[in-house]
């Protein structure tokens, strides 16, 4: 008899949970990876050549494969010497896309990247997910 009561209680809770999830006033959208870069003095044009060459080709290959939705390169106006002067963004369809390491590795061109550490410093980054209000 106790098993039947537990089953009935569980069956009453499941629809309530599903309804609660559907009543969120938003849905989740794409995930954006943001990287903050400080280009070393005198190397800005060299870094831009990298971003317009191997980096661009790789990002386009990722887009063609459906791994990446979009990417952007932004110039920033640093307020202090510790601030980035370049911000890179890569937009992924969702968090699950970040788990496709084998697919990313198959398309990666790391050999052509050279030693970017000599011309830039990565200051940090973050992952953000768009929230789309209903």
Image (tube, grey):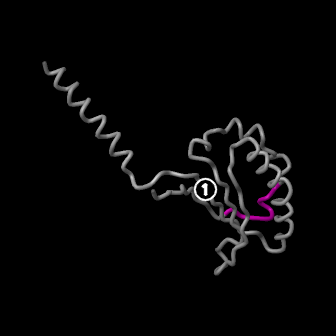
Name the residue at the bottom extreme. 79
Q: Position of residue 84 (x, y in %)?
A: 67, 71
Q: Residue at x 76, y 44 (%)?
A: 64
Q: Residue 116 lies in magenta, yes or no? A: yes
Name the residue at the top extreme. 1
- Looking at the rendered image, the quarter that the C terminus falls into is bottom left
Q: Position of residue 63 (x, y in %)?
A: 74, 47
- Residue 83 image-quadrant placement: bottom right
- Looking at the rendered image, the quarter that the N terminus falls into is top left
Q: Residue at x 72, y 61 (%)?
A: 72
- Residue labelled with disc 1: 32
Q: Residue 21 lies in magenta, yes or no? A: no
Q: Does 26 sit left or right of 90 as displayed?
A: left
Q: Residue at x 80, y 54 (%)?
A: 55
Up-down relation of residue 90 to residue 81 (above or below): above
57 or 110: nearer the eye? 57
Up-down relation of residue 69 to residue 2 (above or below): below
Up-down relation of residue 47 to residue 64 (above or below): below
31 or 44: nearer the eye? 31
- Residue 13 image-quadrant placement: top left
103 or 110: nearer the eye? 103
Q: Position of residue 8 (x, y in %)?
A: 21, 27
Highlighted range, magenta = 115-122
Q: How many marks?
A: 1
Q: Position of residue 117 (x, y in %)?
A: 77, 59
Q: Residues within 10 Å of mark 1 (few under 14, many from 20)?
A: many
Q: Helix, strand, or loop for circle 1?
A: strand
Name the residue at the left extreme. 1
Q: Residue at x 50, y 51 (%)?
A: 28
């Amino acid at each position: 008899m106790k098993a039947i009561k537990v089953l009935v209680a569980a069956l009453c809770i499941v629809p309530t949970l599903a309804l609660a999830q559907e009543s969120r006033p938003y849905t989740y959208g794409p995930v954006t990876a943001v990287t903050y870069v400080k280009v070393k003095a005198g190397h800005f044009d060299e870094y831009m050549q990298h971003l317009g060459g191997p980096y661009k080709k790789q990002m386009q290959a990722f887009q063609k494969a459906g791994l990446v939705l979009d990417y952007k390169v932004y110039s920033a106006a640093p307020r202090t010497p510790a601030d980035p002067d370049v911000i890179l963004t890569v937009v992924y369809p969702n968090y699950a896309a970040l788990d496709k390491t084998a697919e990313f590795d198959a398309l990666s061109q790391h050999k052509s990247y050279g030693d970017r550490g000599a011309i830039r410093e990565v200051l940090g980054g973050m992952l953000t997910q768009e929230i789309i209000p209903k």
